[in-house]
Image (cartoon, rainbow, N blue to C red):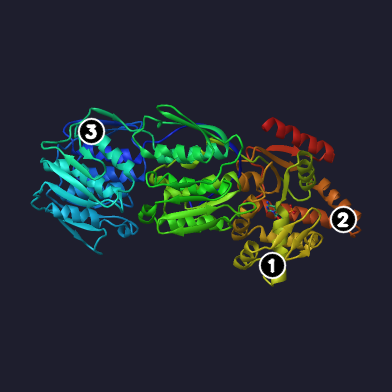
Amino acid sequence: MDYIDLPPLLSAQGTVRLPGSKSISNRVLLLAALAEGDTEVRDLLESDDTALMLDALDALGVDVDALGNNAFCVHGAAGTFPAKDVELFLGNAGTAFRSLTAALALAGGYYTLSGVPRMHERPIGDLVNALRDLGADVAYLDQDGFPPLKIRPATILPEGVVRVRGDVSSQFLTGLLMALPLCGVKITVEVIGELTSKPYIEITLAVMARFGVQVERAGWQRFTIPAGSSYRSPGVIHVEGDASSASYFLALGALGGGPLRIEGVGCDSIQGDVRFADALAQMGARIEMGPNWIEASAPLSGKLRGIELDCNSIPDAAMTLATSALFAEGTTTLRNIASWRVKETDRIAAMSTELRKLGALVDEGADFIRVTPPHGALHTPLSGIDTYDDHRMAMCFSLVSLATTLRINDPCCVNKTFPCYFKQFAQLTQPVPVIAIDGPSASGKGTVAARVALALGWHYLDSGALYRLTALAARRAGAAWHDEARVAAVAAGLDVVFGENSIRLSGDDVSEAIRQEEISSGASQVAALPAVRSALLFRQRLFRQAPGLVADGRDMASVVFPDAQTKIFLTASVDVRAERRYKQLIEKGIAASILPLLLDLRERDERDSQRSVAPLQQSEDAQLLDTTELTVEQAVAQVLLWSNQGS
Ligand code: DC
């Protein structure tokens, strides 16, 4: 899927059960593989990152049985991987890459570890240095300090103390700590520099403890693995819900009214990212928490306020604060986030670029980002929000749909940690309602739709006008109506302003010009071109604004607003339609006669219903409204009735 268009939202509330934590899942899988005995892992996260770890364990000769329902049985290999000569591909899974590097460096085999190009830009030198100090044979296959890596057997002679830098990524310390019990001797790790993302080390220590290894620690500087440590299966282990994933839903509750409850993490969690809830509370959100749940609602004042925060301990969830800041009063400054620069992408740069597309004022530095929302409404980039192959970018920006229709490019990157994110998101949110009215030319759907919009106080989209405008603009630009590429470019660049009583194309009022019969014929021709239809798709979706939209056309229900609450197929016999068109023209003082109008309508019906893209036809879920015998008032009343029943 190239993009997903999120409808604008009215509100958000409900309850969501979180998928398993990525950080805990991959740690548990590795330790279960290294442990003695079988471990039943329940509620494991099923995502790209965990699939890469499972594939790696399989390649390393560890047996894992899928038990169904997110449960797996890992048959522990008791300290040594059976396969001794293996090439591993680990995608962009940082935790898996770093922890397997450490474990395999001490495993006495020949191993190659590689990933996607971005993984090869993410530093690993601090970990490799520490492993080399232990005697490991780890070589860089490309650039010094970065994957891919080649590991060969070596004599590991732990000296008693090994040093590792902690200020670039806490995953280096995590990798070392999890691997060192394989040496079986007492060994101390000393952290050089200020340890970043400390709560992730808490997760590491907690999971190691569940597998029988108690690390002794002095603050965040020294960690000692006692002599004789080895991993033993705890039998059954439950993976907590993902606290970083929780951040999107908590922010959704705080911005969309709420209450929105997440289940799977709470105050008993071992994940530092639950502290994200405190940050949201500081912004004014109402937060309640239990052992295994957190609930967020909007501030009583209705609006969040900007904050200044040291985010070192919640680096992943802090990204959610950056997009929440778009809805806050004042400026939000997130400090101490240098680790963002070495994640799935350079997150400070990516976040700044995309926030600016929405009109925010953004200031960035080596280790901070400062976000001030625009004065007026958020801008809506027609080209969409880019996600940089970073799941968190996609999930953070989904919140923007609380303000506007939003296109998110390459949304499948959420598969890294949360494959059904957008589905769950949709279940918790109420989009701006749409009444979609499709039907053939001159059926009266435009008149009915405009009146329904007026009666409800909703916005109105005459999608046919966009095709007419495209035909007119193409003509003015000298592009032939069958020249798909040129007409699509014209459609993409239409400079249109819909006023109350006028439609302006590049400044000219063209409301009369686009109704000419010749332009009608051109509209029908350009509407048959797939590239033109896709160029106009997002533009049409942008008309969806609170409190609601009535849209008329040919594919409103089937393509443009498939999630419309009310779908109507409005038609009338072709003779009655020709008569109506005739009366309209005569009223406007335009000479006309019925027969050519009838023939023209038949021809257009034929073309609109036979074309290969979005042909005119009644959607299966649309209600049929035949107005042959109805007055406009009767038709409007019927639409309003159905719309009431649908809401
Ligand atoms: O509704 P109308 O007559 O103003 O539409 C003008 C042309 O555009 C008509 O030939 C059908 C086409 N059209 C379309 O293909 N899809 C739409 N959603 C709206 C109109």
Question: Mark 2 — residue?
Answer: 585
Which badge, 2 or 3, comes first in the chain's sequence?
A: 3
Tag 2, which secondary structure? helix
Q: Nearer the viewer, residue 161 or 146?
A: 161
Give how far apart the Cα atoms at labels 2 and 3 are.
83 Å
2 or 3: mark nearer the eye: 3
Q: Nearer the viewer, residue 78 or 480?
A: 78
Question: Mark 1 — residue?
Answer: 474
Q: Is residue 206 left or right of residue 474?
A: left
Q: What is the crowding at mark 2: few (fewer than 14 residues within 10 Å), some, or many (at least 20)?
A: some
Tag 3, which secondary structure? helix
What x and y, as percent, mark residue 423?
50, 39
Question: Mark 3 — residue?
Answer: 209
Disc 3 residue type (three-letter): Ala
What x and y, as percent, mark residue 438?
70, 45
* 474 is higher (above) or lower (below) than 601: below
Disc 2 residue type (three-letter): Leu
Q: Is residue 171 left or right of residue 260?
A: left
Can the viewer see residue 81?
no
Tag 1, which secondary structure? helix
What x and y, as percent, mark residue 160?
11, 46
Q: What is the crowding at mark 1: few (fewer than 14 residues within 10 Å), some, or many (at least 20)?
A: many
Q: Ligand 1 is found in which quarter of the picture? A: bottom right
Q: Is residue 242 left or right of residue 406?
A: left
